[in-house]
Image (tube, coloured by chain):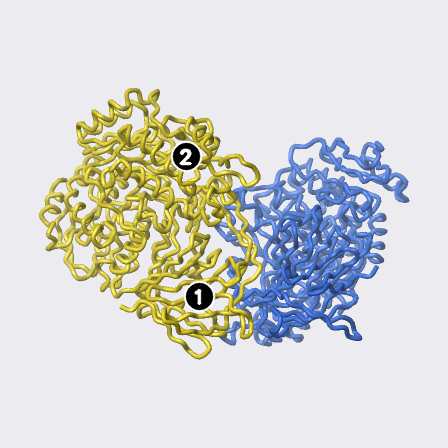
Chain colours: A yellow, B blue
Amino acid sequence: MTVVRLIPAGDGFDLMAGDALLLHHRPASPALFVGTGTADVDAYRGNYVLSDRLDARIPLTHSTIDSTPAGAVIWLAASAGTPPLLRIAVDDAGLALTALDPALNRFWLRCVAEPGERLWGGGEQLSYFDMAGRRFPLWTSEPGVGRDKSTQMTFQCDRDGRSGGDYWNTNYPQPTYVSSRRYALHLDTTAYSCFDFRDPAFHELEAWEVPARIELFAADRFAAIVGQLSTRFGRQPRLPAWSYEGAILGLKQGVESFARMEAMIAAGAVVSGLWCEDWVGLRVTSFGKRLFWDWKANETRYPHLREWIAALADRGIRFLGYVNPYLAIDGSLYGEARAAGYLALRQDADEPYIVDFGEFDCGVVDFTNPAAADWFADRVIGREMLDYGLSGWMADFGEYLPTDVRLHDGTDGMLAHNAWPTIWAEVNARAIASRDRTGDALFFMRAGFTGVGAHCPLLWAGDQCVDFSRHDGIGTVIRAALSSGMMGNAYHHSDLGGYTSLYGNVRTPELLMRWSELCAFTPVMRSHEGNRPDDNLQLDGDPTVLAHFAAMTRVHAALASYVATLCDEAAKTGLPVQRPLMLDWQDDPDCWGIETQYGYGRDMIVAPVIEPDRDRWTAYLPAGATWVHLWSGTQHDGGRTVEVDAPPGRPPVFWRAGSPHAGLFAAIGDMA
Amino acid sequence: MTVVRLIPAGDGFDLMAGDALLLHHRPASPALFVGTGTADVDAYRGNYVLSDRLDARIPLTHSTIDSTPAGAVIWLAASAGTPPLLRIAVDDAGLALTALDPALNRFWLRCVAEPGERLWGGGEQLSYFDMAGRRFPLWTSEPGVGRDKSTQMTFQCDRDGRSGGDYWNTNYPQPTYVSSRRYALHLDTTAYSCFDFRDPAFHELEAWEVPARIELFAADRFAAIVGQLSTRFGRQPRLPAWSYEGAILGLKQGVESFARMEAMIAAGAVVSGLWCEDWVGLRVTSFGKRLFWDWKANETRYPHLREWIAALADRGIRFLGYVNPYLAIDGSLYGEARAAGYLALRQDADEPYIVDFGEFDCGVVDFTNPAAADWFADRVIGREMLDYGLSGWMADFGEYLPTDVRLHDGTDGMLAHNAWPTIWAEVNARAIASRDRTGDALFFMRAGFTGVGAHCPLLWAGDQCVDFSRHDGIGTVIRAALSSGMMGNAYHHSDLGGYTSLYGNVRTPELLMRWSELCAFTPVMRSHEGNRPDDNLQLDGDPTVLAHFAAMTRVHAALASYVATLCDEAAKTGLPVQRPLMLDWQDDPDCWGIETQYGYGRDMIVAPVIEPDRDRWTAYLPAGATWVHLWSGTQHDGGRTVEVDAPPGRPPVFWRAGSPHAGLFAAIGDMA
């Protein structure tokens, strides 16, 4: 399919993205605008309020088109007789933009909207998979706690820490969308941007610089578009088999963690990894027990840790830790980094820029300095983590780069902020490559931006509340998987049990069981004790919950050979393992709007129970196949909504009759 | 003082307002911008969320100046060689603006800001008297309940009814400010506007049309500027003496109200009016007991009301009622108005536009139809109210005009919305004039806009919460008096006891006593039973509270002769009766920032206790006088902050030694 087609039209032009009319530019209804403004940034512990002091917004009503050997060039001006302000070179893959006045730092694009159009992507979106009708600022940040201005939780978090968030807040934004009109658009910029899908007549895309390119993708099949995006933004290496052959237990009770793991194995859990984020030691704050941000083993909390790790390895159990790109000022690495000049500086002094992370302060390693990035990859992650014996870690944060920081390479903080998660991913990937462990050692990130998938092998959905709430509970991890999958990220998972427990909101047995069920059908099944382990029920704190979890780990492990084929497919095509139903069942339009189910590959439909007090659940099954209910074996024709029994232990899962994996699925159904 | 002075400067110009540099217009830093946009209006029961879909914002960087016999004319364009977009004729009192492209519907003006500059006005502002550092949208609406996003009350109201509000919400906005740089600026427009005082370098004034004029005022003395504004926007008639010679009791218990009034008189209260808003009958909703919006006496609830009114009149007690500009569809006047074609219509049908007022629906009388306005003034207010015997009323509402209404004279609802309160005031004033009762019959309004003072004799501060909260409690009525006073409104008062009781927030004895103290030192002392009388303590519900109230009515009545002189002064100069300290004490800059005290005329300083649990209170006393504490007689030099005993019954009030009213004040101090 020809992706980009320019059609001159008298005093304007049309631009096609595949078969879709994307731009309809006329003097009275221009599609392009440039301007100038000054950003107001109000930041507090990873939460940002950005606003614009706008000076000018100039509709580029006057256009002329030159034909050149390299293709068409469009010159755009405010009016006839005034100098052009924007040059656009049209090529097969999009538009290359050049601002002709260096003062221009605002850009708006109006794309044609159609009634009923669906819009997917925007990075990893937690509240809405279909973005139609809403506005999505794209700026990496804390995702918010509550994320819904009508909830008491959000109110309290906004009041006490400005941290309540809203539906669009995300750790991983990306200025890319896929339209149901069978095209995708990407703004090539790391500036703050905003996708506004509220107007029935147009989508307005805003960026706080003139993007270098507007990249376009088109294909008849959505799956092909996702494949193109995966190729463009980076395709992950296959997941290591150990990561999906059993559960990864998240425990952080010092050496007690080992005994608790043994008890869970004794209860029947299949365990392939032990994740102790407290391997660096603890710091107690009002938010909960937090980690000591000096990235080396704490052998006071974990005596003989090297030996423990070796003993686990002998049993095929990997040990995982935790790291992030900041250094606590009271840790030893901070002093090393400061002495070497590896820290980002303040604008007003040759002093490290100190960031408040909530009752403790940190320096920011300046990854724009190649020596600093090398130091972090080799000296910190390489020597202190991989060489020590770790097989993986949570590579946390990446969203907090201050916009008023002074960086080694001179990049403006407003442009570096969104780029940081991808740079942070690259440092982690480079460390792993330096020890030749790519495809074996595994790190996972919540932060992201354009290109994160080229480096980060596995996303995690960030910090959900320990509840069933609409915008911050268990259900949000499904939308996160669907939206990030549309960007070409093949692998996604979540904190089993959720993370954030505040204001008396604590885990229930039911929540832990429902989350275990969900995670059993994601490629990595990793538990988390949450921010306040002592106040919350843990998987091993209730025999029923533990038995249920153990059963789900067995289901998860039994799916390993199927997941291996999904990893193969992902490596080949870029299709995500958890995927929107319409990628495989595009011809059934009833699939397009489904946000709370996913295909686990083409042969399995997962519809997790994400509400409390439910013994039955409904699921939509795509037309064009017959579907077998995993637990009862009952067959259902596709193209309809079915209701099934779904007590704890029986997550609503269906497999495609005729699947080459039918035998495996049937056997799993019999495991109950 | 020359108010307006244009100083051409090469490729731009400066404009002086008095001695202050107001505009510094240069190609690289233009002061004027025009543009186009489309308003998004989300309205719900008087609460509005307005946002702009901006198409263009054009800095008018190119200017040329013509000298004409009538004065200078400035032609402004986007750039040299493009047609001018704005014509400005400069005269002695400001700038007359003409948009030269009819599509232009957005306007921005950047005025020079100075460090430490204070900015007062914006109509009646409840949260901040000094607007420096904040942004103030100017759109008449419900003021919000809570008005502070950090409070539980605001959260609940936002969640349940979108009614929480914010610091800038007000019934009475006005696009006018007074600068401490000794000038005032007014935008002559009824469009939505916004004053943004956040930038240290400039004030940005926005309007959703090109205003007809930018009016400027300047004088060395702030009091003179206020006088100019009062002349411009309308000077009230003197208050009728009866309105300040005793308290006006707000009771709404049908005929039981008369007996309760007698009991309060028997307890020692001085009463000059009885205000029964339920004179029209009741309607019970979830918000509380509301009134039946069909503006005629309900002789079921008030049998023999005419005779009652006559009997009260014989004792010098006036009877007051209630009216607003809407007609309940289940009332008789609605049918009359509808049949006559006096109701505003829908855009999409020749049917009355129906507004939801919270569990009941109303039509909107279309005052742009002169016949409808005459009908309401003569048939409704004239015949049903004045002729029936009423001497006054609350003229409620005025803020709810839908923006998508179809009006008789064709005015766009977006431009009519802000104009409506002033039009509504005019209808009331005309009714009173038609019965030759101007200066005798009295109505009071919470809604307002530019020019409301020309018609409305008395403002009231709207619906406070029944508490001491910072943004919605008793203290807000002081800021409301100060800010509206700066606009030239001489007379202000509040609901004694507050109005809104929701979510278990109820009046305390202390609140009633502190509010009685405050109201004793305002020109009109009017009590209100609130939205939920049965759930709340009333003045006659507690012997201590009643005795305290009665004592305060005696203080209030004793002040009548002093208030009469303040009314004389207001009529002559436009100075408000309750006034910012700096109007009389401008040479003491420590007075300029005071927001919780007021001068009651020049000779009295009132510093009401507006926090709970206080037995002592501090007050600032202006330099240049000696001040006598009303209750103790202790003398204090001015120019300092003093702390005094302030138990209930002893509101912190000081009078100026040497005042011609010293004898009266001393006698009042001895009344205790």
Check disc 2 and report the residue beneath it: A504
Residue closer to the observer: A210 or A320: A210
Do we see residue A488 in this rendering? yes
Which of discs 2 and 1 lies nearer the camera? The answer is 1
Q: Is residue A344 left or right of residue B294?
A: left
Residue closer to the observer: B17 or B63: B63
Do we see residue B296 in this rendering? no
- Tally of marks: 2
- Amino acid at dot 2: Gly
Check disc 1 and report the residue beneath it: A110
Q: Quadrant of the C terminus of chain A?
A: top left
The secondary element bearing badge 1 is classed as: strand
Q: Residue at x 83, y 33 (%)?
A: B636
Characterize the local packing of mark 1: few (<14), some (14-19) or many (20 or more) Cα atoms within 10 angstroms: many
Q: Chain of mark 2?
A: A
**Mark toward the start of the polypeptide (2 vs 1):** 1
- Amino acid at dot 1: Arg
Relative to residue B420, is residue A440 depicted above or below?
Answer: above
Q: Percent from the top left, x then y, of residue A239? A: 23, 43
